[in-house]
C-alpha cells in the first residue's frame, strides 16, 4: 500500500515557525547599524537558494537617497579636469569619519598619465640603511617633477612607529629640570646599538652652560706655580648649588705627587711604648711640600688610655721644709711612668721653682765691703732660707769683720 504524500503548505508552515526576523549588518563599511531581514524574505531566499542580501540600513539609505553625484576639480594643480564623486562614494566617506577621499582624485586624463609614470623605489632616509620605500605613481605625478621626499623604509618605520618622546632628567645632578629624548633620537641610537639613555642638559642649564668658559686657577698648594682648570660643567653644577666662588684644588702635578705618596707609620711619642700611628699620605704630602718635620703623636692604645685618665695634683717635694703647695702631674706623665713601672716623681711646685729662679743671684754671697766671694749657696740652702730653717750668711768676709 503506497504512503500518502504530505501537504506542501503544512511543510512551509512548519518551516516558517522556525524562522525569525533577523538583524543584518549594514552593507556600508564603517556603519554600525543593521537592517531587518524579515522571516518571509528569508524563506524566499532559502527556496531560491540565494545568499543573504547586502542592503543599507535605514539611516544610510536616507542619506543615499538625499545625496547627489558631485563634480569636483582634479587633484593635480593646474589641471582643469574634473572628477565625478558618486552618491555611494560620498556615503562611504561619511561613514569612514568624514574623510574626504574625493579630494585626492584625479581626472581620467591625469589617471592615464599617472599610470604611464609608474612607481619608484627610493632609498630609506636613514643613513646606513640599505632598505627602500615605494614612491607611488600618484605621489610622483602630484609632485610635478620634484625630488622624492625623505622617508623611512617599512622596516625602519616599524621600529620608529611605537616609539614616543621621553622626558629625562637633566645631566646636571643639582638640577631638577628635564630634557626631551625624541623618538628620532631614540631610533637613531637603537640603530647604532646604543643601549643606555643619553645624558643631556635641560634647556635652562644648556643656556647657562653656553655663557660659561673654562677658568684657569692657581694650585692650592703653597709655593706651587702651576694651575688647574675649573670646567664649564663644574661651574654650572656649583651655580645650581648656590656656590659662586671657585673651590681650592691642586694642579695635576700635585695630584700626581699626592697619588704616588704613601702613608707613613711613626712610633708612638710615649717612651717605652711599642705602638705606632699612621700619618695619612695627604698629611705626608703637605708636610713634605712645606718642609716641616715629622709630627710626634700618640698611638691608638695610648690615646685611649689617656682619655680615661686625669691630671693629678701632688705635694711639692719641699713639703718637709714646710711648703704646702702642689704641682700638676699630667696624665701623659702618669702613663709614661705606668709603662715604665716607675713610682711618681718628686718635684717642686711652681712657687718653689719661681723662688729659685728669682734668687739665682743670691746663691753666691759676696762681701758687702770688699766684694770678695764668701760662700756659694746650694738650691737646698736657698729653700731652707725661704722656709726659715737657716739664715742668710752675713755679707762680710773674715778680713772685713776683723777690721
Image (cartoon, rainbow, N blue to C red):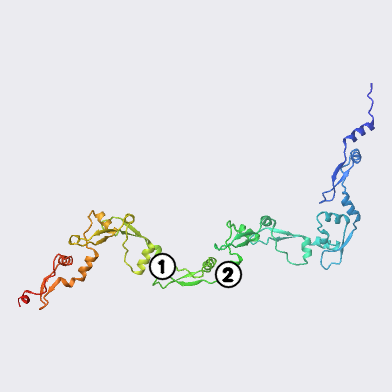
| Among the two numbered marks 2 and 1 on one chain, the one whose residue lies closer to the N terminus | 2
**Quarter where residue 207 is shown:** bottom right
Image quadrant for the C terminus?
bottom left
Number of labels in the image equals 2
Please give left or right for residue 370 compared with residue 276 in the image: left
Q: Which residue position is annotated with label 2? A: 208
For the point 81% across and 62% down, the residue is: 114
Question: How far separated are the C-alphas under marks 2 and 1?
Answer: 31 Å
Label 2 environment density (alpha carbons within 10 Å; few <14, some 14–19, many ≥20): some
Which of 347 and 132 lies nearest the eye of the viewer?
347
Which of 312 and 279 lies nearest the eye of the viewer?
312
Q: Which residue position is annotated with label 1? A: 254
Percent position (x, y) of residue 322? 19, 62
Q: Nearer the viewer, mark 2 or mark 1?
A: 2
**Quarter where residue 327 is shown:** bottom left
Percent position (x, y) of residue 343? 22, 55
Amino acid at each position: 500500500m503506497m504512503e500518502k504524500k504530505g501537504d506542501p503548505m503544512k511543510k512551509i508552515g512548519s518551516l516558517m515557525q522556525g524562522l525569525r526576523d533577523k538583524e543584518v549588518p549594514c552593507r556600508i563599511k564603517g556603519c554600525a547599524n543593521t537592517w531587518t531581514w524579515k522571516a518571509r524574505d528569508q524563506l524566499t531566499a532559502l527556496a531560491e537558494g540565494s545568499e543573504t542580501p547586502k542592503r543599507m540600513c535605514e539611516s544610510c539609505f536616507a542619506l543615499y537617497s538625499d545625496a547627489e553625484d558631485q563634480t569636483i576639480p582634479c587633484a593635480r594643480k593646474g589641471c582643469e579636469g574634473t572628477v565625478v564623486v558618486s552618491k555611494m562614494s560620498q556615503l562611504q566617506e561619511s561613514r569612514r569619519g568624514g574623510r574626504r577621499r574625493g579630494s585626492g582624485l584625479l581626472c581620467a586624463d591625469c589617471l592615464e598619465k599617472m599610470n604611464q609614470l609608474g612607481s619608484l623605489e627610493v632609498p630609506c632616509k636613514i643613513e646606513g640603511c640599505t632598505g627602500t620605500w615605494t614612491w607611488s605613481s600618484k605621489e610622483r605625478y602630484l609632485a610635478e617633477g620634484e625630488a622624492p621626499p625623505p622617508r623611512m623604509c617599512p622596516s625602519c618605520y616599524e621600529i620608529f612607529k611605537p616609539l614616543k618622546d621621553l622626558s629625562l632628567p637633566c645631566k646636571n645632578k643639582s638640577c631638577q629640570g628635564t630634557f626631551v629624548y625624541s623618538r628620532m633620537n631614540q631610533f637613531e641610537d637603537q640603530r647604532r646599538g646604543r643601549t643606555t639613555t643619553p645624558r643631556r642638559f635641560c634647556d635652562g642649564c644648556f643656556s647657562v652652560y653656553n655663557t660659561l668658559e673654562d677658568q684657569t686657577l692657581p694650585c692650592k698648594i703653597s709655593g706651587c706655580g702651576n694651575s688647574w682648570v675649573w670646567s664649564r660643567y663644574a661651574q654650572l653644577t656649583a651655580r645650581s648649588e648656590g656656590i659662586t666662588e671657585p673651590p681650592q684644588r691642586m694642579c695635576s702635578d700635585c695630584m700626581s705627587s699626592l697619588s704616588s705618596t704613601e702613608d707613613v707609620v711613626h712610633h708612638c711619642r710615649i717612651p717605652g711604648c711599642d705602638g705606632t700611628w699612621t700619618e695619612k699620605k695627604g698629611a705626608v704630602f703637605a708636610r713634605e711640600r712645606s718642609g716641616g718635620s715629622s709630627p710626634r703623636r700618640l698611638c691608638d692604645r695610648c690615646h685611649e688610655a689617656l682619655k680615661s685618665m686625669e691630671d693629678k695634683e701632688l705635694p711639692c717635694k719641699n713639703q718637709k721644709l714646710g711648703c704646702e703647695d702642689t704641682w700638676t702631674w699630667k696624665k701623659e706623665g702618669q702613663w709614661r711612668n705606668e709603662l715604665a713601672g716607675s713610682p711618681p716623681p718628686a718635684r717642686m711646685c711652681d712657687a718653689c721653682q719661681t723662688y729659685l729662679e728669682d734668687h739665682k743671684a743670691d746663691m753666691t754671697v759676696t762681701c758687702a765691703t770688699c766684694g770678695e766671694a764668701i760662700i756659694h749657696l746650694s738650691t737646698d740652702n736657698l729653700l731652707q732660707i725661704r722656709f726659715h730653717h737657716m739664715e742668710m750668711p752675713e755679707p762680710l768676709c773674715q778680713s772685713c769683720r776683723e777690721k
